[in-house]
Amino acid sequence: MRYGGKLTPEQFRRMIDDQQREIARHLPALPLYGLDGWTGLRFVGECGLDDDVPRSIGLAHGRPGGPGPYVQVVTTRAGVAAAALERRRAVALARERPMSAEVFDRVDAALRAEVPEAVTIVVDGAPREFTRWRHDGGWIAEAVLGDHPVVVEATGVGPDAVRLTRVRDFGPYLDGRRAFLDGVVGDG
């Protein structure tokens, strides 16, 4: 069987192995945060590079679009307003079909007009103020932690239940990514 008409399951797994090595090499480049005490599925989510320098890396918790809560915590090098707007735009545009320049402009203008609210999220045991925007499926919040913008994207859980902690052991997130993607491939 070929996936997307291009890769066999073996080729897909080799591609994932290569990606795993590349992602593992970049994980220590940014201060990353995960959910304190999370015991469910966790994996490396978003990973954006610019000229081999990490632009953003996200650690995800739960199944995207699945039952139960899902939280992705993205640390980025972008400006804080740009990072949250990018995530909010991705969520809003995912619901728009067909996509066009007019739709993009309409959605972008609506997002820029929204007024956020302040919420408190505990980070490494200390309460921190985040700016939050709600959307139909959940919410997106942002704050600067240290020198980096951090964006939390969540569904099925409120900010009062989110407790972030700095992650230094990326093994469970890499293992979770492998397991999640192996589930996509199945047995071929």
Image (tube, rainbow, N blue to C red):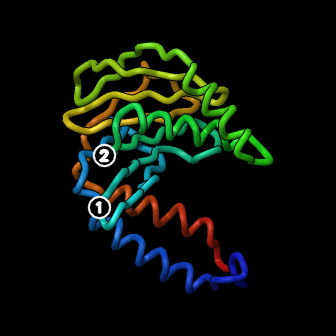
Numbered circle sitting on residue 145? none
The residue drawn where x is 35% and y is 53% is 55
Cα–Cα gap, marks 2 and 1: 10 Å
Q: Nearer the viewer, residue 110 or 15?
A: 110
Q: In the image, what residue occupies the spot 54% across and 66% down?
A: 181
Q: Which residue is mark 2?
A: 77
Name the residue that disc number 1 marks.
53
Q: Residue 140, relative to residue 148: is it above or below?
A: above
Please, what is the three-letter code of the amino acid marked with disc 1? Val
Q: Residue at x 40, y 31 (%)?
A: 81
Quarter holding the C terminus is bottom right
Relative to 89, say whether 129 is above or below: above
Image location of residue 8, percent across then percent down: 64, 85
Kind of element beneath mark 2: loop
Residue 132 percent location from the top left of the image: 46, 21
| Quadrant in which the N terminus appears | bottom right
Q: Is residue 150 left or right of residue 157?
A: left
Q: Position of residue 106 (x, y in %)?
A: 69, 32
